[in-house]
Amino acid sequence: MGYKGLLSASISMLSAAVLALGISGAARADEPLRIGMITTLSGPAGYLGQDIRDGFQLAIDQNKGKLGGQTVELVTQDDGLKPGNAKQIADKMLDEGIKLFTGVVFANVAFAAVPEILDAGAIYISANTSSSTFAGKDCNPNYFVSSWQDDSQGESAGALAQSLGYKTAFLVAPNYQAGKETMVAFKRFYKGKIVGELYTSLGQTDFAAEMAQIRSAKPDMVYEFEPGGMGIAFMRQYKQAGLGNIPMVVHPASLDQAIVQAVGDAAIGVQVTSHWNSDFDNPVNKTFVAAWKAKYGDRPITYYAAQGYDAALLFGVGLEKDPKGGADAAAFRKALLTSAIPTVRGKFKFGPNQNPIQDWYALTAVKGPDGKMMLKTEKKVLTDHGDVYAAQCKMKAAE
């Protein structure tokens, strides 16, 4: 082949390569926007992440595969409740070009993964834990919360215990940051005497020693924070130990809609505070509850599922102004801070640290008309409640 032939062939090959690249680029442009979910799917607390995932996916399905008008794909990985795993997953997802994240259940896991995400300029919407660190001095314009600031759970339980007139209390929580924070938060609103304070191991399911100490202290009431399978074990053993005559006030991590059904009659009368319940009477919640029942039947609708659903709705609001998902984080943020936010809990707005300002309610564990255990909303405990760390957050307002 002569020079002209070689030149012609080279031009043809180059044109073909450019055409292929164009086709490939177009295909990439048409691919779904990926949202990374790092969450706990295994072990005693595995259902917490499963519910967050399924609530989030339900919102996508209801919108025919889209959020904010953009076709999306939820990419979920199990962190196994191991911080190191979560960090590796975050790094891998970031390397793959993912700029939107959610899903972490536990505070110790969040400390490993979330800073990696934020340092990379990506956006994170928490569907569960939000520690004082992320709410206060280390707040970040790319960090949002669809659930609550961690202290709010303990504060609401403390406010309820105080309103019920209990003079003495015994406190139990896991020995990690969220557990320690909830103890401080409870005491911020409860003014009675603390006659006992115990820290358990994260993942512990045998509480015989703790039951003995509670019995010895003879408190007017017990406040415990043991999420997921730990909460099921604690509640059952509490009844088996003959402590059912000592009232228990908890927040939703210790008695959610799955735990109350798993525990059964042992939970009757336990009082719990929450920002959400399945019986809330607002359009978004009714749509969510009906869709969940249609897809999952009698599977309990936990507040984890509700928070996952709300996180998806928040992404939808942001993506309406930032359609490429993280390419214009300022526009995403402005949309969330200035738009009406649809949520299953009704009234909702962000505080200056982009954590929720919302109402908290008292619920009681009762038997429903069908004979199954349920949580019944009784009264409001806190109105427009934010968090004490917001004053430490020095972010500029959205421009």
Image (cartoon, rainbow, N blue to C red):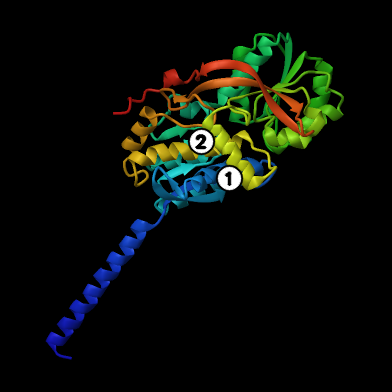
Q: Which amino acid does label 1 sit on?
A: Asp
In the displayed structure image, the side of residue 377 where residue 263 appears, left or right = right
Residue drawn at (54%, 28%) of the image:
282
Q: Position of residue 214 (x, y in %)?
A: 80, 21
Instruction: Determine the secondary structure under disc 1.
Output: helix
Q: In this view, does 164 lie above or below 267?
A: above
Comes first in the chain, label 1 or label 2: 1
SS category of the residue bearing label 2: helix
The quadrant of the picture occupied by the C terminus is: top left
Q: How crowded is mark 2: few (under 14 residues within 10 Å), some or many (20 or more)?
A: many
In this view of the protein, can residue 81 be seen by the observer?
no
User: Residue at the location (80% across, 16% down)?
Assistant: 217
Q: How crowded is mark 1: few (under 14 residues within 10 Å), some or many (20 or more)?
A: some
Q: Quick one: which residue is furthest to the left in this view?
A: 4
Q: Do the residues labelled 1 and 2 touch (CB within 8 Å)?
A: no
Task: Report which quarter residue 199 is drawn in.
Answer: top right
Q: Mark 2 points at which residue?
A: 310
| Front residue of this view, candidates 277 and 394 | 277
Disc assigned to residue 195:
none
Query: The residue under label 2 is which amino acid type?
Result: Asp
Q: Which residue lies furthest to the bottom in this view?
A: 1
**Residue 15 vs residue 96, the one in the foreground:** 15
User: Where is mark 1, residue-wise?
Assistant: 54
The x and y percentages for residue 31 are 39, 57
- Residue 258: x %, y % from top left: 70, 37
Q: In this view, does 293 lie above or below 24?
A: above
Q: Which of 181 and 36 is in front in this view?
A: 36
Q: Quadrant of residue 377?
A: top right
Q: Residue 11 in the image: x percent, y percent?
A: 18, 77
Say which quadrant the N terminus sits in.
bottom left
Q: How far apart are labels 1 and 2 at the CA level?
A: 12 Å
Please indicate whether residue 37 sits to the left or right of residue 205 in the image: left
